[in-house]
Image: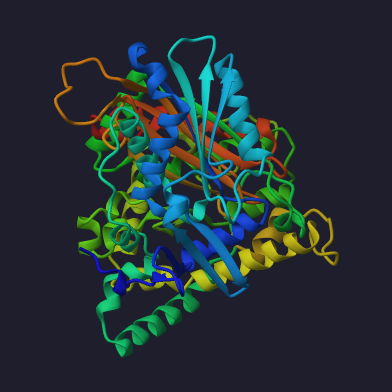
């Protein structure tokens, strides 16, 4: 059993049932994001079919409240509140009373008449409504379909300071399973809190002496400082950016696209045959898609020669979240940390070569749009994907991997904090910032501009089953609950362009979230279409011969 005394959780003065701990580095960054008009909040939208004989009992308010309460007892951060005692003293507070009951806004119900209405409500919550706050970090809304018997939609809304991709899967899976069962025995709150620690409290290096930890931190700072000059430059899709953009809440937009069963199978088999994952190929697919979108505009005369020459010679980068759980304390993992509901991620940065123009490097406006193989051969595509694979391995196998991730957080926190405080105080950007549009060259001269952010969750079928209840002796019986579909929406950061992927029900799904204030919807949709076309061209058919690899 993990001892609470080794974590930063403490009983509040004068109480034995109210606990508190300061937010960790990662959590603080997401907290200040949330202060900025609920930036980074997540929303899971799940469509669920319930057995007709059990429908009314399963989705009754009393049963749903019971299940949500059980969920909070098992994962207490879902019922936590945040107390900002001053700008540098911010705490999670968990009251056992709040875990055992539901407060206003935690669980809501609504009847709807169509899938489209469910999607509209989900969109409104993540884009416009501000349902979460420091006193409500998670909520669930049950939408009952009147047009389709025994069908409901779940909208699970959670602040990013207490969740991540893996935790969101845990929440949905556990909720659906418990919807079919009686309440489990009440868990030990001390043990559950001990699992809900900040990332830095779970690093294996915490067992080192204080002197050794300081030395490792200092070396990591030096390495990071030497790398910092590389963290500028790059370019992305055409967009509208001004010095004020970072202080204007994003207008979150999203779209999804799905490969057919056959296409999905071919792509995954091709990745396996060539010793890569789809995640390794992901950054290169985004880059080649960006190249084609930009090239199309250059050939139409919509990008001038100066900008085109800059983009041709400018290196690129990609970034996204990285699941930290496998790298943390072994005992914590064995006792449930792998699936615990808390934020346990870091961030990766991939360095990409120049735009792949191949034989089209000297193309001129007015000429024909080249095909994929003229820009990047399948062999070169595979080499670039292998490079991403090597970068990921080198990053996670570095002896100072966790410290190198950690030393970046103070700067990240300070940036998010300054934006959050400005928004809290004035609800607008600083008055001294202009509204002058920045060119791609100007953007790259002052900051790192990622081609896009993104992540691939891999095959989620093993993580998020379709049929419930789980386990037991129901294998041959009709399931009580069937998960028909699930998607995740994100309240974007300003300037964000995020490409996600996962395989579910044997089909590969892609989605993009972006800031509609800076990217045109049609442009992003064109880019996603090019990502799909690139995936089909480079991975849709396994490379069977040396001659084919040259194509």
Residue situated furthest bottom in the rendering = 211
Residue at (69% x, 42% y) in the render: 251
- Which of 540 and 265 lies nearest the eye of the viewer? 265
Question: Percent x, y for residue 318?
Answer: 49, 52
Look at the image and name its color scheme: rainbow
Residue at (41% x, 22% y) in the render: 48
Question: Percent x, y for residue 299?
Answer: 68, 34
- Which of 104 and 294 lies nearest the eye of the viewer? 104
110 on left or right of 298: left
Does residue 514 lie above or below 424 as drawn? above
- Which of 545 and 183 lies nearest the eye of the viewer? 183
334 on left or right of 309: left
Residue situated furthest front in the rendering = 14
In the picture, the quarter occupied by the N terminus is bottom left
Residue 433 can be seen in this image: yes
Residue 281 can be seen in this image: no
254 on left or right of 425: left
Residue at (56% x, 41% y) in the render: 290
Question: Percent x, y for residue 131?
Answer: 62, 43
Question: Percent x, y for residue 337?
Answer: 28, 55
358 on left or right of 393: right
Residue situated furthest left in the rendering = 473
- Which of 521 and 237 lies nearest the eye of the viewer? 521
Number of on-image labels? 0
Residue at (35% x, 60% y) in the render: 193
State which quadrant residue 350 falls in: bottom left
In the picture, the quarter occupied by the C terminus is top left
């Amino acid at each position: 059993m993990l001892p609470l005394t080794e974590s930063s959780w403490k009983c509040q003065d004068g109480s034995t049932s109210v606990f508190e701990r300061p937010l960790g580095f990662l959590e603080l960054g997401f907290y200040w994001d949330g202060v900025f008009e609920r930036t980074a909040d997540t929303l899971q939208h799940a469509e669920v079919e319930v057995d007709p004989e059990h429908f009314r009992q399963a989705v009754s308010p009393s049963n749903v409240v019971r299940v949500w309460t059980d969920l909070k007892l098992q994962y207490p951060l879902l019922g936590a509140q945040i107390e900002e005692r001053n700008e540098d003293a911010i705490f999670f507070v968990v009251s056992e009373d709040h875990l055992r009951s539901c407060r206003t806004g935690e669980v809501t119900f609504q009847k709807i008449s169509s899938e489209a209405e469910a999607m509209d409500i989900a969109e409104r919550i993540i884009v416009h409504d501000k349902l979460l706050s420091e006193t409500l970090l998670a909520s669930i809304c049950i939408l009952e379909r009147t047009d389709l018997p025994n069908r409901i939609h779940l909208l699970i809304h959670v602040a990013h300071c207490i969740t991540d991709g893996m935790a969101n899967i845990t929440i949905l899976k556990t909720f659906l399973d418990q919807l079919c069962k009686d309440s489990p025995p009440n868990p030990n709150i001390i043990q559950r809190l001990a699992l809900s620690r900040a990332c830095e409290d779970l690093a294996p290096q915490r067992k080192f002496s204080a002197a050794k930890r300081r030395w490792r931190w200092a070396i990591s700072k030096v390495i990071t400082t030497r790398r910092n000059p590389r963290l500028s430059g790059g370019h992305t899709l055409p967009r509208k950016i001004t010095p004020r953009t970072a202080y204007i809440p994003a207008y979150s937009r999203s779209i999804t696209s799905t490969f057919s069963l056959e296409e999905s199978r071919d792509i995954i088999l091709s990745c396996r045959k060539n010793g890569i994952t789809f995640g390794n190929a992901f950054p290169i697919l985004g880059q080649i898609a960006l190249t084609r979108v930009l090239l199309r505009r250059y050939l139409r005369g919509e990008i001038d020669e100066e900008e085109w020459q800059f983009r041709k010679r400018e290196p690129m980068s990609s970034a996204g979240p990285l699941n930290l759980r496998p790298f943390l304390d072994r005992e914590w993992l064995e006792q449930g940390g792998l699936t615990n509901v808390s934020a346990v991620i870091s961030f990766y940065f991939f360095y990409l070569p120049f735009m792949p123009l191949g034989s089209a490097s000297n193309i001129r406006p007015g000429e024909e749009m080249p095909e994929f193989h003229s820009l990047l051969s399948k062999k070169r595509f595979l080499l670039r994907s292998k490079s991403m694979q090597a970068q990921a391995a080198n990053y996670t196998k570095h002896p100072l991997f966790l410290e190198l991730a950690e030393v970046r957080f103070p700067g990240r926190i300070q940036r998010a904090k300054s934006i959050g405080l400005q928004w809290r105080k004035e609800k607008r950007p600083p008055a001294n910032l202009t509204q002058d549009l920045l060119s791609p060259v100007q953007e790259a001269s002052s900051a790192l501009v990622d081609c896009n952010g993104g992540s691939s969750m891999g095959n989620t079928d093993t993580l998020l089953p379709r049929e419930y209840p789980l386990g037991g002796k129901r294998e041959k019986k009709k399931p009580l609950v069937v998960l028909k579909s699930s998607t995740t929406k994100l309240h974007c950061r300003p300037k964000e362009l995020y490409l996600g992927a996962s395989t579910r029900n044997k089909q590969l799904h892609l989605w993009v979230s972006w800031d509609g204030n800076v990217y045109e919807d049609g442009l992003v949709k064109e880019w996603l279409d090019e990502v799909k076309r690139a995936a089909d061209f480079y991975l849709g058919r396994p490379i069977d011969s040396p001659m084919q690899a040259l194509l």
